[in-house]
Amino acid sequence: MEPEDRRLPIDSQVESGGANLEGMSVLLVDDDVGCVESLARLLGRSGCRLLKSYSVREAMNLINFDTPDCIISDARMPEGGVELLLTAIRERCLECSLLVLSGDDDADVVEGLLIRGADRVLLKPATVSDIETWLLKVRQSKNEKLHLEEMLLKRAHG
């Protein structure tokens, strides 16, 4: 059996649930190329636009030029891991949601990630269905926010 932090982030035996995620952009971040490629292959079937990064530094460069709707990141990586991404998102006031895939089921670790700004933490191996469900909720929330902003603009100019 592989060490827990090297397992694939998703249950690769479970196929995509067929969620339609067209129009969403998702940044996948993990120092394990196999994990990024596996998740990209499965999520790619859902129609979302995928960005891939194999290091925290590369991910931070990407979000300077293209803010994705969502980031799915491994919790532990060289160069500071997801904590650096959380800090960058907060400091830049980026409107993107962050899902952390963690091999550590310690409640204090999970709570700490949520307190620092992760929107959701899933334990490895997460199912594709769990990830797609979260992505659909993020899209719904963003659509509701856009609708509310449009209504407020119409009232202000109406």
Image: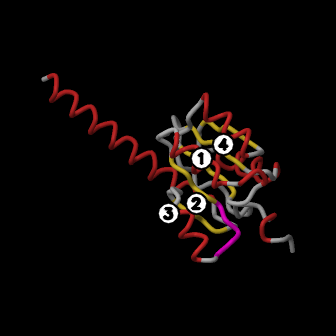
The residue labelled by disc 4 is 44
Quadrant of the image containing the C terminus = top left
Q: Estimate how packed mark 3 is, as few (under 14), some (14 to 19) or many (20 or more) residues with alpha carbons within 10 Å.
A: few
Q: Position of residue 86 (x, y in %)?
A: 58, 51
The residue tagged with tag 1: helix, strand or loop? strand
Quadrant of the image containing the N terminus = bottom right
**Rounded to the nearest whole Å, what is the CA distance between mark 1 and mark 2?**
17 Å
**Rounded to the nearest whole Å, what is the CA distance between mark 2 and mark 4?**
13 Å
Q: Estimate how packed mark 2 is, as few (under 14), some (14 to 19) or many (20 or more) residues with alpha carbons within 10 Å.
A: some
The residue labelled by disc 3 is 115
Q: Do residues under tags 3 and 4 come within 8 Å of each other at their CB atoms? A: no
Q: Do residues under tags 2 and 4 come within 8 Å of each other at their CB atoms? A: no
The mark nearer the N terminus, 2 or 4, is 4
Quadrant in which residue 126 is drawn: bottom right
Quadrant in which residue 148 is drawn: top left
> Between residues 38 and 141, which one lies in front from this camera angle?
141
The residue tagged with tag 3: helix, strand or loop? helix
